[in-house]
Image (cartoon, grey):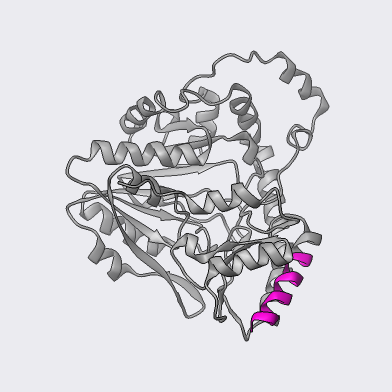
Amino acid sequence: MKFEPFELERIQSKWEHVVEINLTESGVSPITLGELIDDPRSRPFLFERSLGYSQTNGTEKLRDLISSDYAGTTRDNVLVTNGGAEANFVAAWYLLHESGTRDELVVLLPNYMQLYGIWKNLGGRVKSFHLKMQGGEWVPDMEELKDAVSERTAAVAICTPNNPTGAILDESQLKEIADITYDMNAWLLSDEIYRGVELEGPKAPSAFDYSEKVMITSSLSKAYGLPGLRLGWIATSSPETAQDIWAYTDYTTICPSTLSDHLATIALGPDVRERLEKRARERVGAHWHIMKEWLDDHHDILDYVPPKAASMCFPRYDLDIKSLDLVEKLRIEKDVLVVPGSHFGMEYYLRIGFGYEEAKLREGLRRISELMRIIS
């Protein structure tokens, strides 16, 4: 089987540090180490940290803090990983390897395509069901899900809040997806990396509360502005499963960085966590008004559903050009980078991030407008 590249990560890795204006990021602007540790009295302790191996599944204190977000769990339900990327990788590897004849993954689209690509590259089969623009909302097609699942389904993979749409699956939708998945004796695998950066209202519901056979993947990269820590996790309904997946990380990265584990423990302490989530919500809320005004000014070309969480939107455009070609023209002619919808399995869409610097956001949108006027 030919290896399938991860196109989204490749286009970002290749160009995000080259272009003048990068609007591909889906998180909020990263914070500095000084902002994370805002009490100067705490900083000297960093210099006393031994740079040896950390506890390979995450220190007990960190796993306690992570498990506090998932009702009825303890540290034994949690495996700490090097970013959400490793969490997704080892979860997929485990599910495909341990599921016997169940070699199919059913993926909600659009979606961050890492799980989709991992599963195919490991030799599994991938099916899909879709979010659809309907009545000003992104709505999951439950009938399509029912048709997709089978006795060969190892897991159903969702992302909520969703990348790239910013949609949140509500309680009734999560329950229905969980019930359909459980009835087929499959796992529900939910990427929840954007929980905590909702535009309004309470924190998005977690699939953990609706299934007895569930794995959650997440990290500190998006809502907390800490992508450089490369600190993620898997929370599973079964401590035995967390123990089993831990064995898979012995073959990948062995353990989290000692400093990342320590700094993550600070970030997830109740007071700091609240501060970081508040920062993210304020940034996203303020910048969304800029984004919305721009989208509305181009209503003849762009159709969109407002995101409910995360610092990105996913408008559909009415131009006679494929999304990757449009993105290339933007990069070459306007020095602006956005993500083509084709990298999420959705042609004639763009993902535009609005969580970074306001001045660059405004200038980037202005340049996109210039190019769209020329094409139209």
Residue found 77% across the figure and 37% down from its top: 35
Q: Position of residue 216 (x, y in %)?
A: 42, 44
Look at the image and say whether residue 127 sits in the magenta stretch.
Answer: no
In the drawing, does residue 293 fall left or right of residue 88? right
Please provide the residue range marked out in magenta: 362-376
Locate residue 339: give its quadrant. bottom right
Observer-nearest of 145 and 302:
302
Total numbered circles: 0
Locate residue 75: give its quadrant. top left
On the question of residue 188 being in view, the answer is: yes
Q: Position of residue 2 (x, y in %)?
A: 34, 47
Most frequent secondary structure within the magenta stretch: helix
Locate residue 243: give its quadrant. top left
Observer-nearest of 124 and 44:
124
Considering the image in quadrants, where does the C terminus appear? bottom right
User: Is the residue 130 above or below the residue 186 in the image?
Assistant: below
Q: From this viewpoint, which residue is outermost toward the bottom?
A: 300
Q: Position of residue 257 (x, y in %)?
A: 58, 25
Residue found 76% across the figure and 38% down from its top: 32
On the question of residue 71 being in view, the answer is: no
Q: Position of residue 161 (x, y in %)?
A: 51, 57
Observer-nearest of 262 and 107:
107
User: Is the residue 72 above or below the residue 334 in the image?
Assistant: above
Residue found 25% across the figure and 62% down from its top: 148
User: Is the residue 50 above or below the residue 106 in the image?
Assistant: above
